[in-house]
Every structure is written in structure tokens, then in C-alpha cells.
Amino acid sequence: MGYDGRVLRRAKARYDEDRQRRAELFRARQRECYAREPRLEEIDRTLSGTMAKIIAAGFRRGADPRSAIAALAEQNLALQRERGELLTALGYPADCLEEKPRCEACGDTGWRGSEMCECLKAYYIREQNAELSRMLDLGTQSFETFRFDYYSQEQEPRQNLSPYQRMEKNFDICRDYANEFSPKSGNLLLSGAPGLGKTFLSASIARVVSDAGHSVVYDTAAAVFSRFEAAKFRRDEGAEEADEDVARYFKCDLLILDDLGTEMISALVQSALYQLVNARLLSNRKTVISTNLNPGELGKRYGAAVLSRLEGEYRILPFFGEDIRRLRKK
């Protein structure tokens, strides 16, 4: 799984802040308990030295250390029992002076070997959704809130089905794509006039895939290609950030490229789109593209090489009907 470095840094910072906050709360509770019952501090000081004594007994030459270790272990248990009784008498839980990690699976490191632990992944998902929310309305745009009543049930001329039937099919495909997202998933091209629900379904996909713990980057085509341009030509302090943005577009598990065709066309844009589409196909990373252009128009604008990959490797979902934004105003 390819985690977004920028999102991961923010998630790790929040994770470490919360871990530090828990440690500070533990120390405050510890001071409070010691102030009320000084014997507790004596017990903890003795217990903290027990491990060193056990290790020393284990390495003592010329004697069997097992009896010494057993005696120290028994002393340790007796002190723990005494501490628990004192704490209970003060109205605290018996184990409130035992500093335990919140996550036993990783010991609050956030990692289990080379794999991210579920505890840190929860922070990653929250940070990623916060970033996506700056571009998308994840609060209201979801498969659960999608409305079909704006789509006509009358069959369109030159179409074999109505806008309503077409949207039912598109909706089912996008929902299944999001719920079943994996390295085996394909790529989607959402094509049709403005105001037909392409961005809404893209946002819904982003939300589900992100909640499953995959790295998702959403951006408009204009913003993406401007970052390519900055990475290529800028030489100031913003160049490094632009390089990082471009790397995110290539490495994320799912890239959602919205409004392809609304950007100013240039040789750099054509080259960048080819690189992006081709590299993500070769690395088996998935992409969802939405555009107001049909496949023929895409070919004329971006060239035969891009069109070949879109038609050969993407599932094309046509959108048609009346602009939903206009209908809502009525």
C-alpha cells in the first residue's frame, strides 16, 4: 500500500501528540497518588529497581540464579498487591499506576514490523479525509445521499435507455468499485456534460476507499498540471513542494483526476497526462478520471497514445441527461 508521505507526517504528528498527552496525564496522576500516599512512591521506586536485580542475579557467577530470581519475583508480586490495595483504599483503580500502551499490538509505536498498525492507520484516515474535505464535500456527498429523482425516466434520443437507468448503472458500478477496491480493481473514466453527478460519485468513491485505509489523492486536472509545471520550471523554495505533489500523484493507491479537459492545453499538459496515465498503469495503481469530453474529443486533445490507454484500460461510464444544478435551482 502506498501511503501519502504528506498525510502520513501529519497523522504521525497527531499520533505522537496524543501519546505525549497520555504520558503527561499519567505523570500527573502519579504525582497526585504519591502526594496522597507517599508509600506508593517508595513501592514504585523499589519495583523499578527489581528488574536490574533480576538481571544481576541471572549473570552472577558460581551460583544457580533461579532461587534468587524466584525470591525477587515474589517480592515484586507482594509489592504490586500492596500498591493495588493502597490505591483501592484511596478510590483509584488498582492498576492506575501501571503505564500501559493504548495499543497492545504495537506498543504505541504505530507499526508492526514494516506494516502500519491499525491504531496509526485510524489517524491516517482522519488526516486524509480532512485533506479530501478541502476539495470535496465529504459531509454530504456519499452513496447513501445520492438522489436519482433528478434524472429523467424518459428514454433519450440515440440512447438505449433513460438518464435514470444510465445513472442506476453508473451508481452501481461506482459503489461496487469503491467497496471492492483493491490492487485488482480497474480504472474508471466518467464522461459526460457538466452537472450530471460525476464529481458527486467521485467524492463518494474517495470517501469509501479512504475509510478503508487506502491512500487517495483527489485534485482537478488544472491543479495537477500546474504542479507538474511548477516541478519542471520553478527554482525557488516552492519547487520541493511541487516535486512532492507530483510524486503523490504517481504513488497513491487511488488518484481521482477531476475535470480533465478544463485546463489550458499545452505540450507539457499532453506529456504530463501521458506520463501519469501510463506510469500508474505500469505500477498497477488505480485512477478515476472525470471529464466533460467524450473519448473522441479526448483523443483529439491529448493524442492517440493517451486515448489508446484510456479506451483499453479504463471502464468508460457515459453520463447524459439534464444539468442537475439547473434542476435544483428550479
Image (cartoon, rainbow, N blue to C red):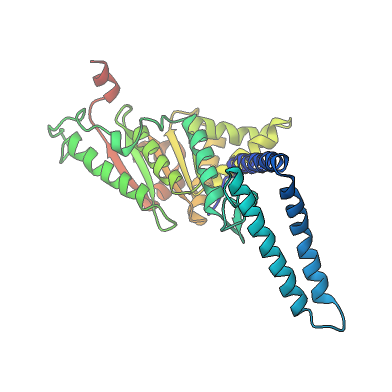
Q: Nearer the viewer, residue 165 or 74?
A: 74
Is residue 126 left or right of 96 when viewed as pictured?
Answer: left
Outermost residue to the right? 61
| Residue 89 screen position, x and y as percent | 60, 47
Q: Nearer the viewer, residue 141 or 314?
A: 141
Identified at 18% across, 39% down, the residue is: 165
Identified at 41% across, 33% down, the residue is: 138
Q: Which image quarter is the C terminus in?
A: top left
| Residue 259 screen position, x and y as percent | 42, 32
| Residue 237 screen position, x and y as percent | 73, 31
Any part of residue 108 in sight: no
Query: Which quadrant would residue 239 be assigned to in this image?
Result: top right
Q: Is residue 35 above or below residue 181?
A: above
| Residue 10 screen position, x and y as percent | 61, 39
Identified at 13% across, 34% down, the residue is: 155
Outermost residue to the front? 89
Is residue 313 left or right of 232 when viewed as pictured?
Answer: left
Query: Which quadrant would residue 33 be assigned to in this image?
Result: top right
